[in-house]
Amino acid sequence: MRLAHKTAIITGGAQGFGAGIVDKFLAEGAKVLIADINGDLAATKAAEHENARSCAANIAVAASVQTMVDTAIAEFGHVDILVNNAGTTHLPAPMEEVSEDDFDKVFAVNCKSIYLIARALVPHMKSRATGAILNVSSTAGLSPRPNLNWYNASKGWVNVATKAMAVELAPAGIRVNAINPVAGETPLLKSFMGEDTPEVRAKFISTIPLGRFSTPEDMGNAAAFLCSDEASMITGVLMEVDGGRCI
């Protein structure tokens, strides 16, 4: 129960990697607010466990973010952990063919949200002189792939933001880390690959030395460690949970 007595907000927690992180946090004793743009799905997920609550949230909108943070504090009294898991991508395409709307959406969800949530939650963490923030990045931000250029760039932003946040917030007792998964069995998988066929999957998996996709359980295990007191000396780390993809 490494997260006993801890409280957490997990964005995009209703499905995919986020759901895996939610499950692990609850199993480790945390109380969790599952925040997701799909409020019904979040509520269904929260109904699975007595220590889970849900909140419909559009993390790219300041007012929605503030409601999410206020809800967590009202439910739990304080927030120990934030997991910025929610993300999106554009379909594979040459960089000059990605629409401006898709570009704006990728950077609003993957980047601006981290700023908005930090603005809303960091003062609370500073007032308690403790906290752990985990950003879910991607191998795309470390080893970019063609035709996902602006998604790659957004995750590179997340990696640099993680280190910058870690340096600035360390004196306040707040740790900031990131995990960098390779693609996995999530709703975004088809978007990353362009099409989901056995042939495309085999080609993708052939680039991963351990020979499989990342799973929600992999993300949950890594996240639980980095957000626990066992990792109290770890901040500013970009942990590759990728089966060796970035070697």
Image (cartoon, rainbow, N blue to C red):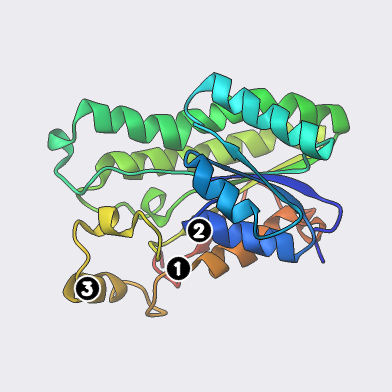
Marks 1 and 2, how far apart at CA: 9 Å
Residue at coordinates 66% horizontally, 24% vertically from top-left? 120
Residue 201 is left or right of residue 184, and the answer is left
Q: Earlier in the sequence, mark 3 or mark 2?
A: 2
Q: Residue furthest top?
A: 63
Q: Earlier in the sequence, mark 1 or mark 3?
A: 3
The amino acid type, in three-letter code, at marker 2 is: Phe
Marks 3 and 2, how far apart at CA: 22 Å
Classify 10 Å Cα crowding around label 2: few (below 14), some (14-19), many (20 and above).
many
Residue at coordinates 33% horizontally, 42% vertically from top-left? 151
The amino acid type, in three-letter code, at marker 1 is: Ser
Q: Which residue is mark 3?
A: 203
Q: Which residue is mark 2?
A: 17
Q: Position of residue 34 (x, y in %)?
A: 62, 46
Confirm whether residue 222 shows in the render. Answer: no
Q: 69 or 110: which is nearer to us? A: 69
Secondary structure category for the residue under label 1: loop
Secondary structure category for the residue under label 3: helix
Residue 73 is left or right of residue 22, and the answer is right
Q: Is residue 216 above or below residue 92?
A: below
Quarter of the figure that contains the C terminus:
bottom left
Marks 1 and 3, how far apart at CA: 15 Å
Confirm whether residue 112 shows in the render. Answer: yes
| Residues at discs 1 and 2 in contact (Cβ within 8 Å) | yes
Q: Position of residue 205 (x, y in %)?
A: 31, 74
The amino acid type, in three-letter code, at marker 3 is: Lys
Q: Which residue is mark 1?
A: 214
Q: Is residue 25 above or below residue 165?
A: below
Residue at coordinates 21% horizontally, 51% vertically from top-left? 146
Q: 154 or 197: which is nearer to us? A: 197
Q: 206 or 67: which is nearer to us? A: 67
